[in-house]
Image: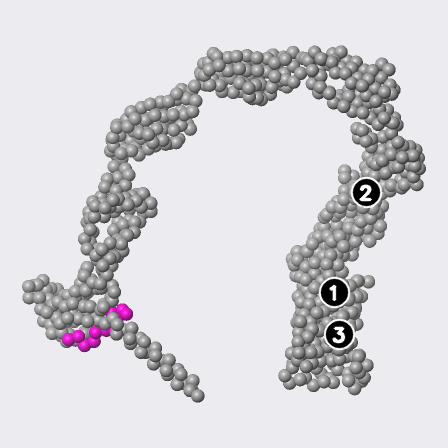
């Protein structure tokens, strides 16, 4: 078998071989130096080496001057310049050889030179990199004016909406033209190199004049050579001759011609003449509607603007004659005032008869007198009217009718008898009993405290009220010709207020009445209305809430006052209608609780069987947490029934005393940490034989999800350490570790 060390050596050799292969692909190469006898520029050069001698200049021709570095041993480069396609270095004539390096290439070592000060030498550098043979290069043109147009080598202009134009061009010289609206065109040339991307900033000269507009009113548009500008204050235009038209809806157009000069500011002032007149129309009666050309423009008063021409103005009102006026006289500078006089009323007549003739008759809600069941009104206003007839023990009749101008409405009515039932109603002493009429909703008084008599069959709305007018409603259903058992409709409500602290001051305030103090945990008989509950105690945040006792379906109600200390920063709900006992258990830190009985079920996810096969552990728990103060609780009477114990008999009972620490959190969550003992007191195989007793030390943690109105849920992890009766298995210690979920329900005493 190959050792791990030999594997690492093999991998390292492969990496070195691969690196050498990549570098061999691109290698720095240089031609021999040649003396340029025609170049005498360095005869009087002031570039000196460390010994004060004139340096020699080496010009390396390369398209990649920025990628090379030179190592001269003990000497150094006295000066370096990167030209377009060359790199120039000034070195001491004492240099005999150098190393030339390039990124991503194998360096050229021991490159030998023979130099004389003040002379110029030339050579070519190559690497084989793709950059050397590139035929195109990135080009970037920047211009402040946007949008601008770029034309290269006479091609069609290309628009750029950004300030920077990007393209790719072949290596070499190119013609460049940059133009923009309202600016002079720039023309020039550019040289694109392999060695670096081309970038240039073009600044265009202004080629416009400015035109400023002062127009009244605003909201106009300007038409300039078939181009429209909306509500413009100024324009920039190229020099030239322009025809401008200023337009606004319902105004005469204004035209002007203008010669715009370069770098000059022009001003156009105009006042537009309106093509309409303002009309102020008022009616003598506020109910009169104002109509203009068939459109409703308001009631009683209206101010409108009408275009030049003929218009029809009307005053309308249902049941009245229409007033009309046609206007054609206009003056744009002088508003017109038109007054609509009172309109003439229209009338008709009505005749209605009723049987039985004793019925009371109402027209438009007002009682009228009838002659033997006949009512006649010869002069009634046109429009919609209502007629109604009532008679005890008869069904009321009601109808709506329309009276037309100069016409009579005729109708005959017959009232049908209604069935009655006999009812007995009682309520609290000195409380009034009323029935709400099914016809018009009127309140009919029946008596105080007790009523016995006839009521219409069917559903009746019964109200009970005190002298202050406070009351509540009940529904009473009676059958035809049947006597009902007495019905009691209670007026007062029963209320009990519970509090989580002792010694607080609680008061109730109902409606407009002053607040009054009450005692908690005591039943109260109070009137049905909405109340405000307030509670105060030194060191606690004041409590305030409301409760509604007007619903007749609610005769008994428990209100809960939950106060928290001023130093307690954990937000908790203010009131619970029926909170679970564990919610109160966590919320009331600082209160001593005694006797909390709990039943629960645990589904253990780690319930492996003794033969190491997969299984689940089902556990029933029951017990009492007798003492709990602040966040510490002591369990001394808790038991567990394990239906499928992984290390004991299938059914085992444990006695589990333990000490718990609770950490309340917001929104119904709490963390719990506990430790204690577990004693095997019975199982279905040994029946609590003393020789088979087993004891464990246990510890665990749980996260409790505890919402109001639901059972609390614990997600827990727990471990048991054997201390008696059994030796811990060597490889199955996970049998003593369990994770699971438990569901609990309980009561406090």
Q: Nearer the viewer, mark 3 or mark 2?
A: 3
**What stretch of residues is rendered in magenta?**
102-112
Q: Is residue 722 above or below residue 224?
A: below
The verdict on residue 266 being magenta is no
The reply to whether the magenta stretch includes residue 103 is yes
Label 1 Cα neighbours within 10 Å, binned few <14 / some 14-19 / many ≥20: some
Helix, strand or loop status at disc 3: loop
Residue that numbered label 1 is attached to: 744
Q: Which residue is mark 3?
A: 643
Q: Which residue is mark 2?
A: 552
**Relative depth, front residue between 212 and 137:** 137
Q: Which is more toward the observer, 468 or 254?
A: 254
Secondary structure type for disc 1? strand
Q: Residue at x 59, y 13 (%)?
A: 323
**Helix, strand or loop at disc 2?**
loop
Q: Nearer the viewer, mark 1 or mark 3?
A: 3
Colouring method of the image: one colour
Position of 230 with respect to 482 (left or right) is left
Q: Residue at x 12, y 64 (%)?
A: 46
Which image quadrant is residue 249 in?
top left
């Amino acid at each position: 078998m190959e050792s791990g060390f030999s594997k690492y050596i093999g991998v390292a050799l492969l990496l070195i071989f691969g690196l050498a292969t990549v570098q061999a692909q691109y290698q720095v190469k240089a031609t021999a130096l040649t003396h340029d006898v025609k170049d005498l520029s360095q005869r009087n050069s002031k570039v000196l080496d460390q010994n004060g001698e004139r340096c020699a200049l080496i010009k390396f021709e390369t398209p990649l001057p920025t990628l090379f570095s030179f190592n001269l041993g003990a000497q150094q480069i006295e000066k370096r310049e990167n030209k377009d396609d060359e790199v120039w270095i000034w070195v001491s004539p004492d240099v005999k050889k150098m190393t030339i390096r390039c990124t991503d290439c194998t360096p050229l070592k021991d490159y030998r030179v023979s130099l004389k000060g003040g002379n110029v030498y030339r050579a070519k550098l190559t690497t084989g990199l793709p950059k050397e043979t590139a035929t195109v290069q990135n080009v970037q043109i920047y211009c402040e004016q946007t949008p601008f147009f770029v034309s290269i080598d006479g091609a069609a202009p290309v628009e750029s909406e950004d300030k920077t134009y990007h393209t790719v061009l072949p290596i070499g010289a190119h013609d460049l033209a940059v133009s923009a609206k309202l600016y002079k065109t720039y023309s020039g040339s550019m040289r694109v190199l392999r060695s670096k991307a081309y970038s240039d900033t073009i600044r265009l000269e202004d080629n416009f004049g400015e035109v400023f507009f002062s127009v009244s009113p605003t909201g106009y548009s300007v038409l300039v050579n078939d181009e429209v500008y909306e509500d413009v204050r100024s324009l920039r235009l190229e020099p030239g001759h322009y025809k401008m038209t200023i337009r606004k809806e319902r105004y005469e157009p204004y035209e002007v011609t203008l010669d715009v000069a370069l770098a000059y500011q022009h001003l156009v002032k105009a006042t537009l003449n309106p093509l309409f007149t303002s009309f102020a129309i008022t009616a003598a009666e506020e109910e009169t509607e104002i109509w203009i050309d068939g459109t409703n423009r308001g009631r009683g008063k209206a101010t409108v603007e009408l275009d030049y021409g003929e218009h029809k103005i009307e005053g309308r009102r249902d049941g009245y004659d229409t007033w009309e006026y046609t206007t054609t006289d206009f003056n744009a500078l002088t508003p017109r005032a038109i007054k609509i006089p009172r309109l003439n009323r229209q009338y008709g007549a009505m005749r209605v008869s009723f049987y039985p003739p004793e019925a009371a008759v109402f027209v438009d809600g007002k009682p009228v007198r009838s002659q033997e069941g006949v009512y006649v009104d010869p002069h009634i206003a046109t429009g919609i009217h209502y007629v109604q007839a009532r008679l005890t023990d008869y069904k009321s009749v009601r109808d709506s009718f329309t009276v037309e101008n100069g016409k009579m409405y005729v109708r005959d009515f017959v009232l049908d008898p209604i069935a009655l039932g006999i009812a007995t109603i009682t309520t609290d002493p000195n409380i009034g009993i009323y029935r709400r009429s099914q016809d018009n909703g009127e309140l009919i008084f029946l008596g105080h405290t007790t009523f016995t008599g006839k009521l219409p069959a069917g559903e009746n709305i019964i109200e009970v009220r005190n002298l202050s007018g406070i009351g509540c409603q009940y529904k009473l259903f009676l059958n035809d010709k049947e006597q009902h058992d007495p019905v009691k409709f209670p007026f007062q409500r029963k209320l009990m207020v519970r509090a989580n602290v002792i010694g607080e001051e609680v008061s109730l305030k109902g409606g407009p009445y002053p607040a009054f103090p009450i005692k908690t945990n005591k039943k109260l008989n109070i009137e049905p209305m909405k109340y405000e509950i307030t509670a105060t105690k030194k060191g606690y945040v004041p409590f305030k809430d409301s409760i509604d006792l007007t619903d007749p379906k609610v005769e008994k109600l428990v209100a809960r006052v939950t106060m928290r200390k001023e130093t307690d920063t954990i937000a908790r709900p203010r009131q619970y209608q029926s909170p679970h006992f564990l919610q109160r258990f966590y919320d009331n830190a600082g209160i001593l609780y005694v006797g909390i009985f709990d039943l629960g079920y645990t589904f253990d996810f780690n319930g492996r069987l003794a033969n190491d096969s997969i299984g689940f552990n089902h556990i029933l728990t029951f017990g009492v947490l007798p003492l709990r103060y602040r966040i510490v609780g002591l369990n001394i009477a808790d038991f567990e029934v394990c239906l499928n114990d992984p290390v004991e008999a299938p059914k085992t009972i444990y006695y589990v005393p333990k000490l718990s620490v609770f950490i309340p959190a917001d929104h119904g969550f709490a963390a719990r940490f506990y430790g204690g003992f577990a004693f095997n007191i019975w199982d279905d195989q040994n029946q609590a034989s003393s020789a088979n007793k087993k004891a464990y030390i246990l510890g665990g943690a749980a996260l409790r999800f505890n919402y109001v109105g639901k059972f609390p849920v614990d997600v827990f992890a727990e471990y048991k350490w054997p201390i008696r009766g059994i030796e811990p298995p060597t490889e199955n210690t996970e049998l003593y570790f369990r994770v699971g979920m438990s569901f609990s329900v309980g009561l406090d005493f």
